[in-house]
Image (cartoon, helix red, strand yellow):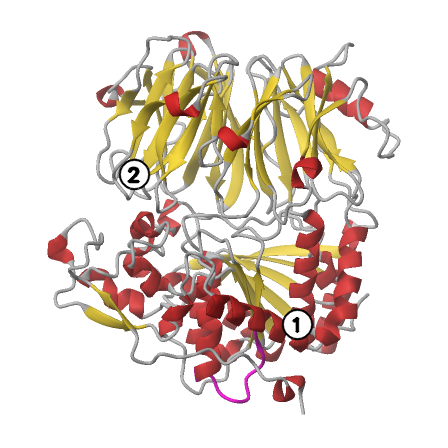
Amino acid sequence: MTSADIIECPKARREDDRVILAGKVDDGLNRGPDESLLLDPPREVPDPYGWMRDESRTNQEVLDHLKSENAYTEKMTGHLTKLRETIYNEFLSSIQETDYTTPSPWGDYLYYSRTFEGKSYKVLCRAPKLSGSGDPGSLAAIEAKKWTGKADDPILPGETCYMDENVLAEGKDYCGINTVVSPSHKLIAYTADFIGGETYRINIKDIDTGELLETEDASPEMDASIEWGVDDSTVYYLKMDDAHRPYQVYRHTIGQSYDTDELLFEENDELMWVGISKTNDDKYLIIDSASKETSEVLFLDLADPSASVQTVSKRREKVLYEVEHRDGKWYILTNVGGTPNMRLMSCDAKAECEDEWVDVVDSEGAKLFDGDYARTLDDVTPFKNHMLALGREGGIPRVWIVRFGENSVVSSFEQLTFDETAYDVGYGANKEYETDIAVVSYDSLITPLQTIQVSVDDVSVRNVLKEKAVPSYDRSLYSCERTNVLSRDGKTEIPVSIVYRKDFYEAAKANGETLPTHLYGYGSYGACMEASFSATRLSLLNRGMVYVIAHIRGGGEMGRQWYEMPNGAKYLCKRNTFDDFIDVANYLIDSKLTEACKLSCEGRSAGGLLIGASINQAPELFRVAVLGVPFVDVVPTMIDETIPLTVVEWTEWGNPNEEKFFDYMMSYSPINNVKEGAKYPSCLLTGGLHDPRVQFWEPAKFAAELRHKQSDDCGAVCLKMDMAAGHFSASDRYKYLKELAFDFSFLLDQLGIASKVH
């Protein structure tokens, strides 16, 4: 008799007559922008566990149920206490607890952060730039390598710690901090969230004295994003509406009441999400208002006190664009003209200039980024004499250097190359505008994170400023591969990244055996799951597991066409995400790498939707599934605009109130498709009580639905609800590692390899 037989799981109250109406309903709510498209008459959606929904987080019945779920999960996993401790200690042994980030030159200082053994949060530090021959970054890297490794010793001479997040976190269950240093480097503005609900308040601090010039007690609730103006007298921030959508941009003068702050912009279209940033030359505040399909960018000249907010280009349906500035010109990433990917265009920096946009070309007249299928463009960051561009080619992230001659004419265009065939590369900290150095971050499945400095004039001149310390890691013991899996449509090739420990892999192949395998995926929002390094993953690899990342449609690995209709995985082709994942799972089994009884799967957030839909489609393929903060209540959530962030998501999934989308979304919504009597894998679901993105009741409802419908011989269904966190799990790094150890121990136990370790 197993523990599952003798430990009684929570019995959630079920209201079989409870439904939600989709479509045209006279309830005063926003059901969609076009009433003629709504279902009429409305359709019923079963919602037997709808009573779990409680935005106030105070309903005693709901709280008691969550506590009973946590108690059940603790009982079901009680025998894993020692294993969790072992894995947690393995995590600690694979990280350098007392460490520092790469010092980055900015102004008169070198900025970096430090962590200390036993302390949960980082400490922000800076030191004066060093004198000597050579660039500041290289000099700092050389000096930092002399550090003794002791917590009490400075990384660089003259080090000062200007923000200790551990102090801010004292007595708090959660601590989320966003910081911005002022233009004079004398002040720091920081927003703080001590609940995990992603609602922040602002503080202004004098760096030298430590005095708080303004405290959060006087601050309104806001988004995390803040920007300084042209000097230390002004900050810009975002307020959110009742649906937790940033929609208003305010200007605040330091020392004055927030009641007198000036409203600069308000976005009333509930499909649009507002963000703020500054151009890299600090000349303009950029206000970006965008849905998943349409955007509008506004700008404010920070040097002109009389300037007003102006529009770069009025919004046009299905046209996306982003803007940067350099030397009197806008540099625009856009899909205008219907290009499948973003092209790079430019024009003089002025308002309503869309008719003047032209493609940026090289010295021979060839377009740098034409928006075609082969090359994607995700970001540009201009500097005085060059520009960095970030995008993808062949499914791999790439960085390009664009060099300028006179009159901003492109003199050359060059891609950075690396020896490994699959890797992750992106920007490092490039804070200096006038520089001939580019800093990039680089890692792969078997290469720990490196900060690499590259000469803009000669990209072969490189210097690894710092590599992330991974104690006792021996790269030679591990290997990785990149392959493609043919999807069921017979034409789409799905990229797959695989990493494993060589000795386990070679022994299994020699003996004709299969290996326990963990399959991870996401596949939404055009987001990419990169082939990056993870020190914690070693605890799986060292027990003989193969780790696989499926770069499925819905992500952006192969460009926006990998995401958009008609052949990506959005709207009415969303099921391609789940089909691709299942096809990869079948490939792993058919190729004899693993078998169903040794295969686990995992996804978080929209990746939790992926796992929920996949185990509904093919429950027999997996032994165990991990669903982190899973978006599994798709249709009931997307019907109701009163749930935070619902309306802005209509341009991702579709609006089930509309006839066009209802049946299709119902066909994959995990909560609505659990198979009666099917044998499901063991499932671990996690959630955060204060999560504003995926509400806590979604995993709770799905756990109850699984238990209600699956066969009696299924594995455990465990829900672990963090009562003091939000969407992004624990902010405390040690608590996060303990939670990850919990997930890993559940996984290993269900696969029967808990005691296996090399």
Question: Which amino acid, by three-letter code, is at mark 2?
Answer: Thr
Which quadrant would the C terminus be assigned to in this image?
bottom right
Q: Residue 159 carries which label?
A: none
Question: What kind of secondary structure does the magenta stretch mostly adopt?
Answer: loop
Whether residue 205 is situated above or below residue 541 in the rendered picture: above
Question: Where does the image place residue 560, in percent across and percent down from the top left?
Answer: 38, 45
Element type at marker 1?
helix
Looking at the picture, tell me which residue is in the foreground, 634 or 145: 634
Looking at the picture, tell me which residue is in the foreground, 722 or 632: 722
Q: What stretch is highlighted in magenta?
A: 709-718
Distance from label 1 to label 2 (Cα)?
52 Å
Say whether marks 1 and 2 touch (CB < 8 Å). Answer: no
Indicate which disc, 1 or 2, sits on the residue closer to the N terminus: 1
Q: Which residue is drawn at 27% across and 33% down?
A: 336
Question: Where does the image place residue 426, in percent across and percent down from the top left?
Answer: 57, 36
Image quarter for residue 7?
bottom right
Kindly identify which residue carries mark 2. 339
Return the residue found at the far bottom: 1
Say whether residue 406 is visible.
Answer: yes
